[in-house]
Image: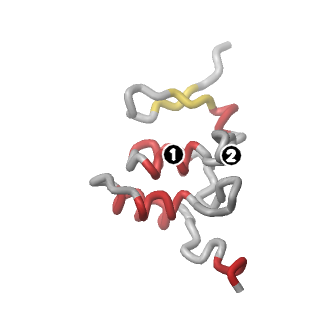
């Protein structure tokens, strides 16, 4: 039997459910798929990943950025919608601030 796939309406991007159980797979800088979707203003991708359990408060490996930070600093037209999706998906606007005290 084939593994189930979720189609995220982004150039027919497929993400296996098995991989989504490990949503924190990251690039060499520790950015998750959700980080990258937020940086690029990919609202359908952000919504798809959040729906399937991506961590809205994950930091990159240097603890510099969460997906919310990436969405806020993005210069794409959909960045505000990505921010709203993250906040509705449980993103903490204070994530990491306790490290500054």
> In the image shown, does 11 or 28 lie closer to the viewer?
28
The disc placed on residue 99 is none
| Quadrant including the N terminus | top right
Look at the numbered disc 2 and give the secondary structure of its residue. loop
Q: Position of residue 52 (x, y in %)?
A: 58, 45
| Residue farthest to the left, as pictured | 77
Please provide percent x and percent y for residue 100.
68, 81
SS at mark 1 in the image: helix
The quarter of the picture where the C terminus appears is bottom right
Q: How many marks?
A: 2
Which residue is at the far top? 1
Q: In percent of the image, x 44 and y 35: which residue is there?
A: 8
Label 1 sits on residue: 36
Name the residue: 51% across, 27% down: 14
Q: Which residue is mark 2?
A: 24
Q: CA distance from mark 1 to mark 2?
A: 12 Å
Q: Residue at x 69, y 32 (%)?
A: 18
- In the foreground, 6 or 84: 84
Residue 3 in percent (x, y) is at: 65, 21
Give 90 or 68, whichever is nearer the viewer: 68
Q: Is residue 17 left or right of residue 6?
A: right
Left or right of residue 73: residue 100: right
Nearest to viewer (mark 1 / mark 2): 1
Q: Quadrant of residue 63?
A: bottom right
């Amino acid at each position: 039997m084939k593994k189930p796939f979720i189609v995220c309406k982004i150039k027919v991007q497929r993400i296996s459910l098995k991989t989504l159980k490990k949503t924190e797979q990251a690039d060499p800088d520790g950015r998750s798929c959700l980080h990258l979707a937020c940086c690029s203003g990919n609202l359908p991708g952000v919504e798809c990943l959040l729906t399937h359990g991506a961590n809205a408060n994950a930091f990159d490996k240097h603890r510099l950025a969460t997906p919310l930070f990436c969405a806020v600093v993005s210069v794409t037209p959909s960045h505000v919608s990505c921010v709203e999706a993250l906040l509705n998906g449980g993103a903490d606007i204070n994530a990491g601030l306790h490290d500054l005290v």
